[in-house]
Amino acid sequence: MWNVAPDATFHMTKRVWKDGGVPDWLRRSLYGFAVIVAFLSLFLAFDRGRGEEPPVVRGPVVRVFPEPGAVALRQEAIGVDLAFGYDALIEIDGRPIPDDQLDRVSGINRVSFTPGEGKEIETLDEGRHCASVRYFNAGDAPEQASRPYSWCFTAA
């Protein structure tokens, strides 16, 4: 029926491994798995820390921005979200920001300052900067402001 030489060896689909090594399909599968694990590890490493930051627990200070230790743009707003019923004054690198240059959003009780032309600070130099806010009851005079809440960030 089949014309096979009597001394010919017939191998089924079984592959003979060279020197007891790993078959190609297994080696390729392991490389693929390693690449997937590497990409997943990178994703998780860079995704870690994102999400909702814990609120600042310091009297009426709910949140400051830029976040402490963050890298911010040189023209980015610097400010604070406060509990309702409070107001604040802002200092940047020890320089008080005049009240008429502060931006206030009453709906979310936010006080901020954005550097710009003709303002106390026109642009932030690259490097580390420290800001502080002095908060007080909205009905009180700013001179009755409590001690400051301070944080630092880096401008790029």
Image (cartoon, helix red, strand yellow):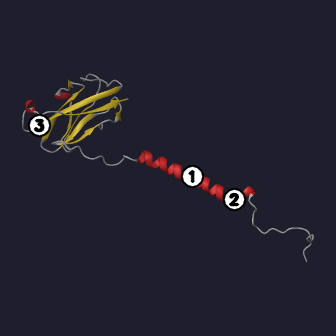
Picture quadrant where residue 88 is located: top left
- Where residue 15 appears, as percent x and y from the top left, is 75, 63
Nearer to us of marks 3 and 2 is 2
Q: Quadrant of the C terminus?
A: top left
Q: Alpha carbon of mark 2 to alpha carbon of mark 1: how far?
A: 17 Å
Q: Quadrant of the N terminus?
A: bottom right
Mark 2 vs mark 1: which is more N-terminal? 2
Nearer to us of marks 3 and 1 is 1
Nearer to us of marks 2 and 1 is 2
Element type where label 1 sits in the image: helix
Element type where label 2 sits in the image: loop
- Where residue 94 appears, as percent x and y from the top left, is 21, 24
Mark 3 vs mark 1: which is more N-terminal? 1
Look at label 2 and name its amino acid.
Pro
Q: Which residue is mark 3?
A: 136
- Where residue 128 appears, as percent x and y from the top left, is 32, 28
Using residue 15 as the reference point, say whether residue 94 is left or right of it: left
Look at label 1 and name its amino acid.
Ala
Please tell me how crowded label 2 is: few (under 14), some (14-19), or many (20+) other residues with Cα within 10 Å: few
Q: Which residue is mark 1?
A: 34
Using residue 72 as the reference point, say whether residue 6 is left or right of it: right
Question: In the figure, 105 relative to 116: above or below?
Answer: below
Viewer-proximal residue among 33 and 15: 15
Residue at the (10%, 39%) spot, across then down:
138
Q: Which label was assigned to residue 23? A: 2
* Contact? badges 2 and 1 (CB < 8 Å): no
* Contact? badges 3 and 2 (CB < 8 Å): no
Question: In the figure, 1 relative to 30: above or below?
Answer: below
Viewer-proximal residue among 25 and 54: 25
Using residue 6 as the reference point, say whether residue 97 is left or right of it: left
Mark 3 vs mark 2: which is more N-terminal? 2
Q: Alpha carbon of mark 3 to alpha carbon of mark 1: how far?
A: 56 Å
